[in-house]
Amino acid sequence: MKPQGIHPTTTSISQPKMSFRGKNAVVTGGAGGIGLQVSKQLLAAGAAKVAIIDLQDNLEEFVKLRAAHPTQSVMIVKMDVANKKGVEATYEEIAKTFGNIDIVVNVAGIFNDKDVQRTLLVNLGGIINSTLSALPYMGKDNGGKGGIVVNMSSVVGLDPMFIIPVYGATKAGIINFTRCLANEKYYQRSGIKFVTVCPGATMTDMFTNFTEKIIFPETSDETYRILDRLNKQSAADVSRCILNVLEKDKNGAVYVIEGKRVFPLEMKAQWTGKEQAL
């Protein structure tokens, strides 16, 4: 299903260009799913150093990753993105090891609407913690080289899905947070671009025991019907699209990722009175 409000032009996935060669990147949630696939894609595209931040372990995949890219650096940091001070310390460690940070892709997230606080702290808080912790080491106003931050939201952050209100609220917050940071005045000072990606249904661990994690168990039958109807894509498909978005390098852009394609959204202002109010 084509998302509402998207720009009529779409972009097919192209092969990554040499723009990633020699770059240093950070990926949160990189131990599995979309985050792991993004890490693989970045290394395959020539990134010099990739740091993976995740609370989960995936030793077998990390060994494979390093073996496949012996001349590139893969740094693994076990950290909960909801831990603000821990994330700040992690970025300080990465910056000391890498020298500079060019790319941040924030993927880390969970689904458990029954655990409201944890969902808020990880999904929205984690994105905010990672993004703000990266800025001192990326911004030209702090001696950095500038760069790009891609924050992963979801299509349910754009259009409500009644069965997952808490998860959807965190994803809507990510879109607004990222667009705020993409303000042109801030970019002129920092040289950092901010982009939001909103994948459609993607085959990850989020779907495991899905109905056990929804707030209203009486909607379980309807939930199964909805899940069955969704056109699901793979984590690898989404990761290739994220690299395509990185190549576009467009500050403030919001993209839907669905069916192995990237759809740029036209985000129209809804509140027309703000200029006069200010």
Image (cartoon, rainbow, N blue to C red):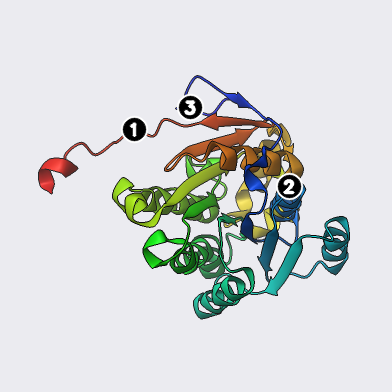
Q: Nearer the viewer, mark 3 or mark 2?
A: 2
Q: Earlier in the sequence, mark 1 or mark 3?
A: 3
State which quadrant residue 36 falls in: bottom right
Q: Amino acid at mark 2?
A: Gln
Q: Give the residue at x 51% y 68%.
A: 121
Residue 217: where, in percent of width, then height?
A: 63, 54
Inter-mark Cα distance, 1 to 3: 11 Å
Label 1 environment density (alpha carbons within 10 Å; few <14, some 14–19, many ≥20): few
- Judging by the rendered image, the residue that carries numbered circle 2 is 41
Inter-mark Cα distance, 1 to 2: 32 Å
Instruction: Tell me the quadrant of the picture where the N terminus can be found.
Output: top right
Question: Does residue 165 sit above or below 224 in this rendering?
Answer: below
Q: Amino acid at mark 3?
A: Ile
State the residue in front, 123 or 184: 184
- Judging by the rendered image, the residue that carries numbered circle 3 is 6
Q: Is residue 96 visible?
A: yes
Residue 137: where, in percent of width, then height?
A: 48, 67
Label 2 environment density (alpha carbons within 10 Å; few <14, some 14–19, many ≥20): some
Q: Give the residue at x 70% y 40%.
A: 240
Inter-mark Cα distance, 3 to 2: 26 Å
Identify the secondary structure beneath mark 1: loop
Q: Earlier in the sequence, mark 1 or mark 2?
A: 2
Which mark is on residue 268? 1
Residue 57: where, in percent of width, then height?
A: 78, 70
